[in-house]
Amino acid sequence: MAKKIWIVLFISFLIYSASVYTNCDKKAETALNKEVKKGWDVWQAKNCQSCHQVYGLGGYMGPDLTNTASEKGPEYMKGFIKYGTGRMPNYHLNDDEIESLLAFLTWVDKSGRSAVPEKAVHWTGTYIIDDK
């Protein structure tokens, strides 16, 4: 009797494991939709993290973009992305790439906060942890 229970448990475990293994990508795809994934690909391809930060991690030349979507809005961001500025180069992204990048940054914005008070940012771009 105990042997039959172990066999049933083992077979159940195998079926469950196979189900999780074959369906895990589908669940991840719904959590992170295709447009956001394409935006992440643009972010990586253009090496945006070398100048910009998300969640306080990345370069120091540009601003932290974690919450830019909610603070500045998509039209503001689109202008910077499309035309560049004095310090940010124009990467000549097409409209599809820009929309994907905005989708990624909007997703990042919804997933966390990265607000550091200006008085806590040193002129070198590092954070002042203690004002003593």
Image: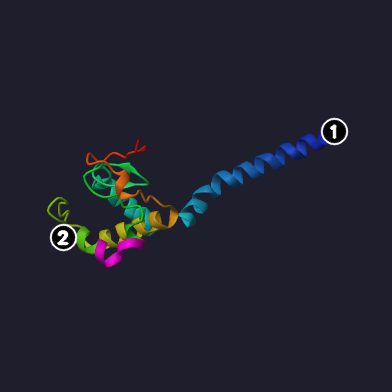
- SS for callout 1: helix
Three-letter amino acid code at the position of disc 1: Ala
Relative to 22, is 38 on the left or the right?
left
Q: CA distance from mark 1 to mark 2?
A: 71 Å
Q: Which residues fall within the magenta stretch?
A: 70-77
Three-letter amino acid code at the position of disc 2: Tyr
Instruction: Residue at 39%, 54% (x, y): give it.
Output: 108
Residue picked out by circle 1: 2
Residue 36 in picture, x, y percent from top left:
37, 56
Relative to 123, is 13 on the left or the right?
right
Q: Label 2 neighbourhood size at 10 Å, few (<14), some (14-19), many (20+)?
A: some
Residue 109 in picture, x, y percent from top left:
39, 56
Residue 129 in picture, x, y percent from top left:
36, 38
- SS for callout 2: helix
Residue picked out by circle 2: 83
> Which numbered disc flags the more N-terminal residue, 1 or 2?
1
* Quadrant in the picture for residue 123: top left
Quarter of the figure with the C terminus? top left
Residue 81 in picture, x, y percent from top left:
22, 58
Instruction: Residue at 50%, 53% (x, y): give it.
Output: 26
Asked whether 19 falls inside the magenta stretch, the response is no
